[in-house]
Amino acid sequence: MDRAAELIRHRVTAAGGKMPTVAVVLGSGLGAFASELDGSVVIPYEEIPGWPRSTAIGHAGKLVVGSCNGIATAVLAGRAHLYEGYTAQQAVYGIRVLRRLGVESVVLTNAAGGINVSYRPGDLVLISDHINLLGQNPLSGPNDDELGPRFPDMTEAYSKAFRVIAREAAASLGVSMPEGIYVAVPGPSYETPAEIRYLRVIGADLVGMSTVPEAIAASHMGMRTLGISCVTNHAAGVVDQKLNHHEVLEVGERMKGTLIDLLRCVVPAIAGA
């Protein structure tokens, strides 16, 4: 991680940039925000020591560091998933490297299936809490005390203050943003209708294959987190139709303008919170 942090620091400072204090992780089909930064430095993941490559469709696989309305920001255009063969520890590598560079706040976005029947494709939902059904935790194994404590508290994995900021920003844009509980499952197959019924019973509103390891690692390191899901489809069995990844990408493309506007409002606000 030290080598990765040093390479990023060198590339950014050599271009006259500043070290980021806020990071944004972009989910499937939601990568357009990466091109919105001013004075950006783009570093493909394969050029960063130890950084896992993105192989999922809809994930560009690059780190972009630049300015979002005057705030030095790092954008991860693509993430690593467990279904790609990565471990939970590898999935959070980028978050840990950015923490070493001084990032204090992170926005985690994802494409999610709507379990809650009130959600519609295209809705943006604030994550209030999560359920980890991945079968892995990025903190398993020996604890690195330099990163955080052995048993970190997860009572407020998703910052209440950040959720207030996001709701206010959304309201200013005329966008309604309900809150919901996100459940992470391994994938890559979509869930069966029976599984969705089970997930609804245990309290989940949204289902996806990412985000939770990053939120855990961020909490472990004392970072504050905001989670935003873009509902790209009804979960299996909610409506009588089959699921496919093209639908996910299409809805992400349709919602990119709204998400960009929201992030441009939210990033400066959480940086000063």
Image (tube, rainbow, N blue to C red):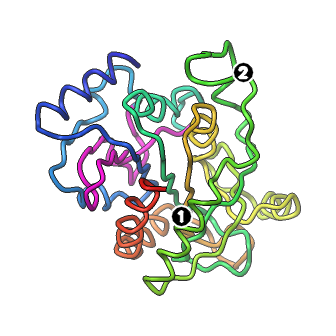
Crowdedness near tag 1: few (<14), some (14–19) or many (≥20) residues, C-alpha within 10 Å: few
Q: Residue furthest right?
A: 201
In the figure, residue 251 lies in which quadrant? Answer: bottom left
Measured from the top left, where is residue 25 in percent x and y?
Answer: 44, 49
At label 1, which amino acid type do we have?
Answer: Asn
Q: Residue furthest left?
A: 15
Magenta-drawn stretch contains 121: no
| Image: 49 above or below 20 | above
Q: Residue furthest front?
A: 272
* Residue in the image at 34% along x and 74% along y: 257
Give the camera-side residue of 138 and 100: 100
Element at badge 2?
loop
Between the residue at mark 2 and the residue at mark 1, the CA separation in whole angstroms equals 39 Å
Q: In the drawing, does residue 4 fall left or right of residue 185?
A: left
Residue that numbered label 2 is attached to: 150
Q: Which residue lies furthest to the top in this view?
A: 142
Closer to the camera: disc 2 or disc 1? 2
Label 2 vs 1, first from the N-terminus: 2
| Image: 262 above or below 132 | below
Measured from the top left, where is residue 96 in percent x and y?
Answer: 48, 29
* Residue in the image at 88% along x and 63% along y: 201
* Residue in the image at 73% along x and 44% along y: 132
For the N terminus, give its image quadrant: top left
Residue that numbered label 1 is attached to: 244
At label 2, which amino acid type do we have?
Answer: Arg
In the figure, residue 252 lies in which quadrant? Answer: bottom left
Measured from the top left, where is residue 91 in percent x and y?
Answer: 52, 33
Disc marking residue 76: none
Give the camera-side residue of 132 and 38: 38
In the rendered structure, are the residues bearing label 2 and label 1 in contact, judged by CB atoms less than 8 Å apart? Answer: no
| Image: 221 above or below 195 | above
Read off the magenta span.
53-82
